[in-house]
Image (spheres, helix red, strand yellow):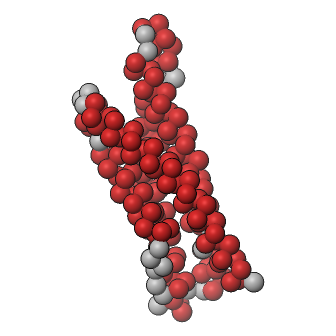
Amino acid sequence: MTADIPELIKVWSQFGHPILMWILFGLTIYTSYLGIQWRQTRTADKEVKKELLLKDFKTRHYQLSSLLLALMVMGNMGGMAITYINNGKLFVGPHLLVGLSLTVMIAVSASLSPLMQKGHELARYTHITLNIFIVSLFGWQAISGMDILTKIIDRMS
């Protein structure tokens, strides 16, 4: 199966996952900022709220979060696929396990949206808590991913 894939594609495809993930890490931080701004908008007094509503933090947070969910799932699957194509196996270790955990957490976090829209505070606090873990673990993933990328580059030279 792997013999059919040109070597050049196999080599350069290994960089797609880290590039996408660094972009998603930045998007995760920005999406978190939008969520915080939406929460402040919801709890602001009437005058401030009118001004903040014009910035449409709610819609921007929701739309970017949907994009983030889709791209994180695709990036996770793509990273595993590229690893398998290039090595004939997955390396079960902290980077893979945390990546899979992040994918589950972002899916659960997104699934809380209908409950949050109905005003369920427990869903909101669970969403916030999951997202704090997501941002923290994603930061760790970025660092551990760079270690893996360094090993791949060393192997190439």
Residue 105 image point, x, y percent: 37, 53
Q: Give the camera-side residue of 124 and 46.
A: 124
Question: From what the image shows, is residue 69 above or below residue 77?
Answer: above
Q: Is residue 60 above or below residue 9?
A: above
Compared to residue 148, the image places residue 103 above or below, namely above
Classify the position of the C terminus by image quarter.
bottom right
The location of residue 77, given as percent across then percent down, is 44, 68
Residue 16 occupies which quadrant of the picture?
bottom right
Residue 78 shows in the view = no
Q: Residue visible at 33% across and 34% down?
A: 124
Residue drawn 53% across the image and 85% down it? 87
Tell me the residue at 54%/60% (across/down): 141
Depth check: give the residue in front, 131 or 3.
131
The percent coordinates of residue 133 (x first, y second) are 44, 48
Residue 84 visible (yes or no): yes
x%, y% of residue 19? 62, 61
Q: Residue furthest right?
A: 157
Q: In terms of depth relative to the viewer, which is nearer, 41 or 66? A: 41
Q: Is residue 77 above or below residue 84?
A: above
